[in-house]
């Protein structure tokens, strides 16, 4: 039998435990309390508990952005008394930081009064300053009243508070977070809202894309104080792994005999910076500075560093970067709470967490709105039923002894629910007018439309993601602003190429100008006659136009039909899965016209390019002539009116050229027949064509056989010795029979035993075939089936891998 505590002796009331066990348990409890309750943000809304409680308390007080400010002391008291039983200084400090435009990229509180400065000045006491919600924080709280989030008891069980906020604003990405927990810390940088939205939209389109592809949209951190990030290595590491170090520099320029500082690194005190410079000048660590002035005002930072007459601005600048806070490092540690547990997160994991949270919120919000809309329509149905038989309704009510009997009579007479009858009995006489009845009918029609729309969101795959996209676009239009922090390739930078693994990739281009890269391993070899796998997701009126096997480290030369060449690195082409449509080429290079050829080169030191045009013209130019290709492209060859570039190949020495026409002819000649020409030369005749015929492809005869493929999926390989070598300008010989079954020739390729080829169709199907499985036949034959095509589909490209 257990004894009461008061009856125990003092010796019996002492519980003896091993100290190491008690210390371990107590320290773990304390650690988790700090980690979950104070130091780390939740990955879903990017807020710590104190910040979340401040925003909710301000909303509860009615302090929206369009309302007057209220004293900070009043707001702090609300937070302390209802939700956060800690020190008032802690709450006020958190509130102050949420209002500082030099601390948060997008402040969540609109403050009035002295909230501190970039010089490190303290804010005024809370009895002097005033606060209200910022417009952006209302986006964090939107839909809170629609049963979208979980609620819990406050500290004394008298009120409820939200566990998380709906957070339309991707707060953790745009504002970042910092905090020191027990045994861990988080330090997440802010980003530009417009770039975050673009990256999230790209991620929704293709969650499989890699970090370098996402960085085409999200360049890197964007700090509220601006400045310059030196290099991209730290950014790429942080986005890929969750940890990285970036180097920040102040923005400076030279005016006459002075260095002007207009932006300083994030979290650097301007007053402390000036003090440090003055100390170093006094100690002669930095030489060449005659005067130091702070001319900053409401328009921004302006520090004037006046130089001595013989001082070199570049040398002084480098000394300042080396010894002062004009250059600093920002250690990125992306740790946040995921399901209540701290986790190190990559960029893709942060984006996935936001997307998952918004999907959950939108589903709950839509379910709530649908329930309310159906409830209102149910009431409207009852009201309109009563109005249609108003005389009978009035008669029943007047004949009833009380409201309960009237309700019962109405339910039985018109098959109405209790809710409908309650609304009917509470109708005012003015509702009996014809205008009021018409208004109710219009409202019912509106509710029916709303119910259909909400039901579509809940039942149609992809509709919730469409809503997410729409809300993100609205956020960007409403609150987006230009990037403040620029990213420069500095001496401290490491080439991004060194961080990207070298691998073989397939680069796919469509006729409407979409491009992507994907791993060659995506396509396993199939037997001849296979239907293939989806190579790219395309619009109905789009088709694959070019396929190239390259490396992530090679240069990809892109040639337009107008004879202009552009150059990008393989890794710069956005990666995507087989089912993604890729990215518009115009977002990668400012191309004019259609892409007609793509070529992969490791360097520009050796090799010769051979060009072929639709009208049978060929041109040979050394690759070194194309070494310095501008971003806007350079001319690769000159074209006559009505002509267009068809193919570009890389020669390796004394080789034979094969030109193929659409009608099934092939002209073979030695490349020495074409003399080397300048970069913008027009070329010479390579093949004479019959009227209505045109050159469709060119091959270099390096293999044992020539593979000819027609648009209807037929083809064959023919030994090279069966093709008579002629001089350039000949009409050529038959290479395959073109008829209704085969269709026109689309490609010729040099192949040997052991090679494999990838056939791509207009509808985006791709098949990889071992060359050994294709039968050898003579020139004047029809070939065999290489690819089974859907009705109306055609082969458009053939690539040797």
Image (cartoon, helix red, strand yellow):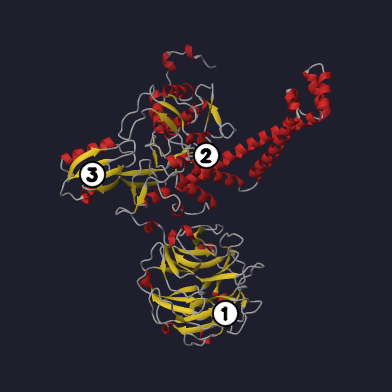
Determine whether 183 is above or below 386 in the image: below
Snapshot quadrant of residue 638: bottom left
Q: Which mark is residue 596?
A: none
Q: Earlier in the sequence, mark 3 or mark 1?
A: 3
Does residue 427 appear anywhere in the picture?
Answer: no
Which residue bears the numbered disc 3? 323
Which residue bears the numbered disc 1? 693
Marks 2 and 3, how far apart at CA: 42 Å
Measured as percent of width and height from the top left, residue 741 is found at: 66, 76
45 horizontally vs 332: left or right = right
The quadrant of the image that shows the N terminus is: top right
Q: Which mark is residue 168?
A: 2
Measured as percent of width and height from the top left, residue 76 is found at: 43, 24
User: Which residue occupies 30% across, 53% down?
Assistant: 492
Q: Residues within 10 Å of mark 1 (few under 14, many from 20)?
A: some
User: Which residue occupies 57% across, 38% down?
Assistant: 361
User: Which residue occupies 62% across, 77% down?
Assistant: 784
- Tell me the element at label 3: helix
Q: Earlier in the sequence, mark 2 or mark 1?
A: 2
- Tell me the element at label 1: loop
Q: Nearer the viewer, residue 2 or 208?
A: 208
Front disc: 3 or 1:
1
Measured as percent of width and height from the top left, residue 474 is found at: 53, 43
Front disc: 2 or 3:
2
Marks 3 and 1, how far apart at CA: 71 Å
Q: Residues within 10 Å of mark 3 (few under 14, many from 20)?
A: some
Marks 2 and 3 close (CB-CB < 8 Å)? no
Measured as percent of width and height from the top left, residue 608 is found at: 39, 76
- Tell me the element at label 2: loop
114 horizontally vs 433: left or right = left
Marks 3 and 1 close (CB-CB < 8 Å)? no
């Amino acid at each position: 039998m257990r004894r009461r505590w008061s009856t125990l002796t003092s010796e019996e009331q002492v519980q003896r435990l091993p100290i190491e066990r008690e210390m371990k348990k107590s320290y773990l409890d304390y650690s988790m309390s700090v980690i979950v309750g104070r130091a780390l943000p939740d990955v879903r809304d990017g807020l710590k508990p104190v910040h979340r409680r401040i925003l909710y308390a301000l909303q509860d007080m009615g302090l929206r952005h369009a309302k007057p400010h209220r004293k900070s002391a009043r707001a702090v008291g609300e937070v302390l008394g209802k939700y956060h039983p800690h020190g008032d200084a802690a709450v006020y400090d958190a509130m102050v930081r949420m209002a500082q435009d030099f601390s948060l990229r997008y402040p969540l509180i609109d403050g009035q009064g002295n909230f501190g400065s970039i010089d490190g000045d303290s804010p005024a006491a809370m009895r002097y300053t005033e606060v209200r919600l910022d417009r952006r924080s209302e986006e964090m709280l939107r839909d809170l009243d629609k049963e979208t989030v979980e609620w819990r008891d406050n500290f004394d069980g008298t009120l409820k508070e939200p566990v998380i906020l709906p957070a339309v604003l991707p707060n953790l990405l745009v504002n970042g977070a910092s905090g020191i927990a027990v045994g861990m810390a988080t330090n997440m940088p802010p980003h530009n809202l417009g770039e975050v939205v673009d990256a999230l939209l790209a991620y929704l389109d293709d969650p499989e894309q890699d970090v370098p592809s996402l960085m085409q949209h999200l360049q890197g951190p964007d700090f509220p104080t601006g400045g310059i990030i030196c290099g991209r290595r730290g950014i790429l590491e942080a986005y890929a792994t969750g940890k990285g170090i970036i180097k920040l520099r102040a923005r400076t320029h030279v005016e006459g005999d002075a260095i002007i500082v207009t932006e300083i690194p994030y979290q650097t005190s301007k007053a402390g910076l000036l003090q440090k410079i003055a100390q170093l000048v006094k100690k002669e660590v930095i030489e060449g500075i005659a005067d130091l002035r702070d001319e900053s005002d409401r328009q921004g930072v302006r520090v004037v560093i006046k130089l001595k007459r013989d001082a070199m601005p570049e040398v002084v600048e480098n000394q300042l970067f080396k010894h002062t806070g004009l250059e600093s490092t920002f250690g990125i540690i992306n740790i946040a709470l995921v399901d209540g547990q701290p986790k190190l997160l990559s960029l893709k994991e942060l984006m996935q967490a936001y997307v998952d949270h918004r999907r959950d919120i939108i589903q709950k919000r839509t379910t709530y709105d649908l329930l309310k809309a159906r409830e209102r329509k149910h009431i409207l149905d009852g009201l309109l039923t009563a109005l249609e038989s108003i005389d009978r309704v009035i008669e029943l009510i007047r004949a009833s002894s009380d409201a309960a009997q009237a309700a019962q009579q109405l339910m039985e007479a018109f098959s109405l629910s209790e809710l409908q009858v309650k609304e009917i009995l509470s109708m005012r006489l003015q509702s009996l007018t014809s205008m009021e009845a018409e208004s109710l009918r219009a409202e019912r029609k509106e509710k029916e439309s709303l119910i259909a729309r909400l039901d579509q969101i809940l039942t149609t795959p992809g509709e919730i993601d469409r809503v997410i996209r729409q809300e993100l676009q609205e956020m960007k239009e409403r609150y987006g602003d230009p990037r403040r922090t620029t990213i420069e390739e500095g001496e401290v930078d490491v080439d991004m190429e060194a961080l990207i693994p070298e691998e073989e990739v397939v680069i796919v281009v469509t006729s409407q100008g979409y491009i992507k890269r994907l791993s060659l391993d995506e396509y396993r070899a199939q037997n001849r006659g296979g239907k293939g796998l989806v190579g790219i997701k395309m619009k109905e009126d789009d088709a694959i136009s070019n396929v190239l096997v390259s490396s992530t480290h090679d240069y990809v030369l892109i040639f337009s039909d107008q004879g202009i060449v552009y150059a990008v690195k393989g890794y710069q082409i956005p990666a995507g899965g087989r089912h993604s449509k890729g990215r518009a080429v115009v977002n990668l290079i400012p191309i004019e016209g259609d892409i007609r050829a793509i070529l992969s080169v490791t360097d520009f030191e050796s090799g010769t390019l051979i060009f072929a045009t639709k009208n049978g013209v060929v041109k040979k130019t050394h690759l070194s002539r194309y070494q310095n290709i501008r971003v806007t492209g350079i001319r690769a060859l000159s074209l006559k009116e009505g002509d267009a570039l068809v193919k570009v190949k890389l020669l390796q020495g004394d080789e034979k050229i094969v030109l193929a026409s659409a009608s099934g002819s092939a002209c073979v000649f030695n490349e020495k027949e074409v003399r080397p020409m300048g970069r913008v030369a027009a070329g010479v005749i390579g093949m004479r064509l019959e009227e209505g015929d045109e050159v469709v492809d060119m091959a270099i005869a390096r293999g044992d056989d020539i593979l000819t493929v027609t648009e209807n999926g037929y083809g064959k390989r023919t030994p090279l010795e069966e093709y008579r070598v002629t001089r350039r300008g000949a009409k050529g010989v038959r290479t395959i029979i073109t008829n209704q079954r085969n269709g026109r020739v689309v490609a010729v390729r040099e192949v040997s035993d052991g090679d494999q080829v990838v056939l791509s169709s207009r509808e985006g199907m791709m098949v990889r075939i071992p060359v050994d499985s294709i039968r050898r036949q003579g020139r004047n034959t029809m070939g065999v089936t290489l690819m089974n095509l859907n009705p109306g589909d055609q082969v458009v490209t053939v690539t040797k891998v």
